[in-house]
Image (cartoon, helix red, strand yellow):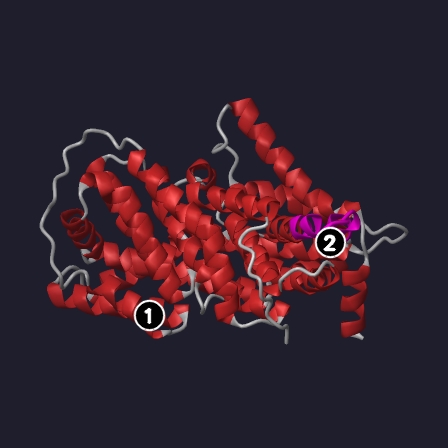
Amino acid sequence: MKKENRNQENEYKSFLGLTPLLVFLVIFLTTGIVTKSFTNMPILVAFIIVLAYSLCLNRKGEKLPLDKKVDIFSRGGGESTIILMVVIFILAGAFYSVANAMGAVESTVNLGLSILPTKAILPGIFLIGCVISFAMGTSMGTVTALTPIAIGMSQQTGISLPLIVATVVGGAMFGDNLSFVSDTTIAATRTQGIELKDKFKMNVLIVLPAVIVTLIILALIPIGSATLEVGSYSLLKVLPYISIIICALVGFNVMVVLAIGILTGAVLGLSLGAFNFVELLGFIQRGFGWMQDLCLIAIVIGGIVELMKYYGGIGFLLDKVTANVKTKKGAEGGIAALASLIDIATANNTIAIVTSGPLARDISKQYDIDPRRTASLLDIFSSAFQGIVPYGGQILVAAGLAQLSPVELVPYSIYSMLMIVFGILAIVLGIPNFKKKVEQK
């Protein structure tokens, strides 16, 4: 019976179901315009208002009791990927807090500054993010590992904090999009029935120009004339970061990676006398506290998205995006728009791919689109918007660690914006165009 009800929810379509997202945008934009700063509206407050609005809605010809709507909200907020994200947020906060307390952040920053010339810090931190995220397959893990380092570099050099933190997010989204072990890559290839390597060959040719242009832009951005003072560093204190990078490269689960990082920082901090056991517990709790808002935001967003599904918003979106598709390029544009809009609505690029993937496969077959191209477009556009929306997990974590408003990072999301630009160019120009198509499974 529950399965039947869920299918009925997915088939229902209504514009009304999209209005919670529109209400959020109106609240956010209006507050920003009136106060002349888009950082003045707290994200959580905005979504609580949207939740209140969502609970007042009903399907046409139906009046669902409030407790039933709350059940739907709770189902979405308690969904497994949401809870997993919350746990990652908490562990990320604890790791950063412990690493900071035992001197790992300062030592890692000073080590990085000793290697990178001041003028190359921005492109350098972007490239490091690309390499780590590609190896790890998780943008969240990359953001967690590099954001504290970026914060320290900003303090040392005078580089704009939103700029350098957004640069970290950009590097993280590179691997999220391209890595062989990324959940988005796996979702895109599975929904289109192709091999990982086939999608990679197509995907990398589309985004490589975006990487090159991003590096050029970052190298040309003036970062001030502040004198770079490189302090002392201890390789021993850098071990917490080295440990999580090595564990991630080995392929450990991101929660295990963060747990090992916390343990490494705790053992080293106790051994070096940076804190005692009681203080260690306090630092871990402090890190948890830093992430409380982010955890609540993730849960509330998950619940609102589930209500939007019930009210027919996601179904309406799927229907409208594909209604006017008539040509091959139009079909590719529809696939890109589908992935983009669902990611904007759900703030989860994996969910966006899984949701739009089956329909994209049907469109691909109908208009004879190379399945490698379809998989690439799904992954590129969903990942690009995931690196831009201020309520996406990656930006939320980065902003939380840097004590910034997520909106402050958006104007500096250079790589994510260029992914969209070059993705559109690939559709318009029909490149790359491999002569031999692969067979779908």
Our reading of the magenta stretch's main secondary structure is helix
Please name the residue shown 23% across and 29% down the image: 224
Please name the residue shown 68% across and 64% down the image: 361
Which secondary structure lies at badge 2? helix
* Start-end of magenta stretch: 317-334
Q: CA distance from mark 2 to mark 1?
A: 37 Å
**Can residue 193 be seen by looking at this rendering?**
yes
Across and down, in percent, residue 258 comes to: 35, 66
Please name the residue shown 62% across and 53% down the image: 339
Q: Which amino acid type is marked by label 2?
A: Leu
Q: Is residue 122 above or below residue 192?
A: above
**Can residue 391 be seen by looking at this rendering?**
no
Which secondary structure lies at badge 1? helix
Quarter of the image with the C terminus is bottom right
Magenta stretch encompasses residue 131: no
Image side of residue 108 versus residue 65, left or right: left
User: In the figure, residue 122 lies in which quadrant?
Assistant: top left
Image side of residue 88 versus residue 301, left or right: left
List the residue tagged with mark 2.
Answer: 318
